[in-house]
Image (cartoon, rainbow, N blue to C red):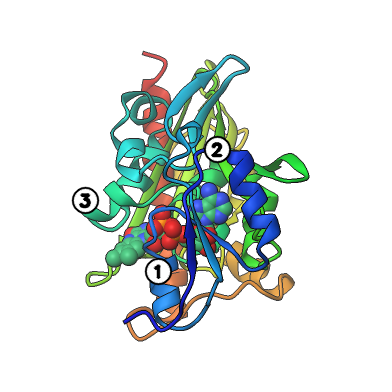
Amino acid sequence: MIPVQFNYKAPDNLEAATKLLSENQGAQVLAGGHSLIAAIKSGKISPPLLVDLKKIKSLEGIKQEEKGFLKVGAMTAYDKVASTSEIREDYSALAEAANNIGDAQIRNWERIGNIFAYSDLACDVQAVALVLEANFNSVSTSGNHTIVADEFIALGFQRQWKLNEIITSLDFPEPTPGSSSAYECIKHPASSYAVCGVAASITIKENNIISKCRVAVTAATSYAIRLPQVETAMEGKIPTIENIAVAAQLAKENVLETSKTHEELNIMSDVYASAEYRTHLIGVLTQQVLVRATKQAKLSFG
Ligand SMILES: Cc1cc2nc3c(=O)[nH]c(=O)nc-3n(C[C@H](O)[C@H](O)[C@H](O)COP(=O)(O)OP(=O)(O)OC[C@H]3O[C@@H](n4cnc5c(N)ncnc54)[C@H](O)[C@@H]3O)c2cc1C
């Protein structure tokens, strides 16, 4: 039984959708409905109106933009993201994270634009958006906005995201030569949600020096964060197993320090995985993901 009554509209264009949101205070956008309907059913929220985006065709699909971005529409299903050959080849961390979500049925139904708005704590794609330096595009009656993943994820978590904004797409910058990315995750065996996930992207120059490294953790922390100490320890180094091991050792400390300086950032703990276990996993997965991303980046030279 759904204990709350709500109205339902499914406009076929963004202008109508943003107008509906601005005219109906508390109205929420409906994408795949997996999180939203569950929250309504449990009585956590009771929006007066749901604005379904499924008829707005411009929000769906993946395309290469001339200005050097891969644009993934907010209403693109995870399964489409995981199975698109261009994403599998050039943005492997994104394909791996999308493929890690739930099961086949979930991936076929849930859409990539939603989780950031909902600040889902165990969201796989958040860490990937950080390491691939994605931009989020959104629209409201006051115009179009673009916000970089670094700012957007923390803001989303702090619930400053305005309900009258619709995320329209995620833009992923084209990878430079010699770069690759990967995602490693330990999943909960029952819910299949991530217990700890780490994404990395690496760029290696032809002189075999790492020129750029991005590492981010999700699910073990209350929102996804980058690990700048690990990144700095990798940059300027030769990609050896020893150098990776030294950098990965900094991961745990980096997260603990960040949680001390960021009030809202906690290390997650529950009956399945304690905070101590999750912090241990951060170190282990960081090492694994760096090894794989580095190996792939080297291979990309051919
Ligand atoms: C069984 C199960 C297993 C799961 N496993 C995983 C997992 O392993 N990893 C993982 O990361 N996640 C997992 N999830 C979470 C899942 O990814 C979220 O439930 C999902 O992202 C919600 O997607 P949806 O399309 O159903 O969004 P909805 O439920 O429709 O929307 C969620 C929220 O986002 C808002 N919203 C949606 N689209 C937009 C938009 N374009 N612009 C602005 N706001 C928007 C809605 O208003 C709502 O507040 C799992 C969920 C289930 C049910």
In the rendered image, residue 85, in percent from the top left (x then y), is placed at 31, 25
Left or right: residue 152 compared with residue 87? right
What's under tag 3, amino acid-wise?
Ala
* Helix, strand or loop at mark 1: helix
Tell me if the residue at label 1 has its CB under 8 Å from ligand 1: yes
In the rendered image, residue 235, in percent from the top left (x then y), is placed at 61, 37
In the figure, 98 relative to 162: above or below?
Answer: above
Give residue 37's mark: 1
Q: Residue furthest right?
A: 142
Circle 3 residue: 104
Circle 2 residue: 13
User: Considering depth in this image, is 224 or 67 the residue closer to the camera?
Assistant: 67
Q: How many other residues sit within 10 Å of disc 2, few (<14), some (14-19) or many (≥20)?
A: some
| CA gap, disc 1 and disc 2 | 23 Å
Left or right: residue 258 compared with residue 80? right
In the figure, 172 relative to 77: above or below?
Answer: above
What's under tag 2, amino acid-wise?
Asn
* Helix, strand or loop at mark 2: loop
